[in-house]
Amino acid sequence: QVQLVESGGGSVQAGGSLTLSCTIPGYIYAGHCMGWFRRAPGKEREEREGVATIGIGRLATLYADSVKGRFIISEDTAKNTVSLEMNSLKPEDSGMYYCAARGGWMPACPLSRTIYNDWGQGTQVTVSS
C-alpha cells in the first residue's frame, strides 16, 4: 500500500473557505481515480463518506449532494496534486478528511470508499458556527 500525503485543513468560521491538497502517487495515470472522503466527528474510520472524486486526466468529477455548488475538486498537473477547494463551509462539514486513490482504469469514479486502495493519514477540518 502507498501512503498518500495530504496538506491543508485547519479551523475556520462558518462561511469561510479552506483548500486541501493531495500529492498524486506515481502509479496513478489517466483514467484512474482519486477522491476525498470525510469521517464525521464521533464516527469510526470505516464510516468515511465520499465527498468528491475525480477521474485523472479526464476531469470527470462527482460530488456528494451535501457539497454540490460549494466544493470543487481539481487536478493540477504542474504540481501533480489533486485539490479540494471548500467554500461556504458549514459546521456539518467538520471532520477528518482523507485523500484516496485507486490504480487501474475505471469508466467512472464512484463515491464509495470500498473501491479505493490507498489512503492518506487524514487532515482535520473544523468549522465553527
Image: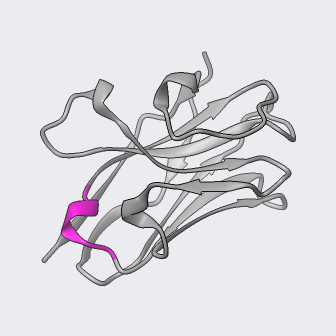
Q: Is residue 81 left or right of residue 68?
A: right
Residue 67 or residue 41, whichever sits in front? 67
Residue 106 or residue 12, whichever sits in front? 106
Residue 68 or residue 48, whichever sits in front? 68
Q: Is residue 73 left or right of residue 99?
A: right
Q: Is residue 15 above or below residue 58?
A: below
Q: How many marks?
A: 0
Magenta stretch encompasses residue 93? yes
Question: Going 56% across and 36% down the picture, which residue do you hit?
Answer: 100
Q: Is residue 62 above or below residue 120?
A: below
Q: Is residue 29 left or right of residue 97?
A: right
Question: Going 49% across and 75% down the picture, which residue do you hit?
Answer: 69
Q: Position of residue 120 (x, y in %)?
A: 49, 35
Q: Is residue 80 above or below residue 73?
A: above
Magenta region, residue range = 89-94
Q: Position of residue 112 (x, y in %)?
A: 49, 33
Quarter of the image for residue 30 reads top right
Image quarter of the C terminus: bottom left
Question: Going 63% across and 33% down the picture, which residue do you hit?
Answer: 101
Question: Going 66% across and 46% down the picture, which residue do you hit?
Answer: 23
Residue 65 or residue 35, whichever sits in front? 65
Judging from the image, the colouring scheme is one colour
Quarter of the image for residue 89 reads bottom left
Furthest residue in direction top, as rendered: 1
Magenta stretch encompasses residue 63? no
Image quarter of the N terminus: top right
Q: Position of residue 11 (x, y in %)?
A: 26, 68
Q: Position of residue 77 (x, y in %)?
A: 83, 58
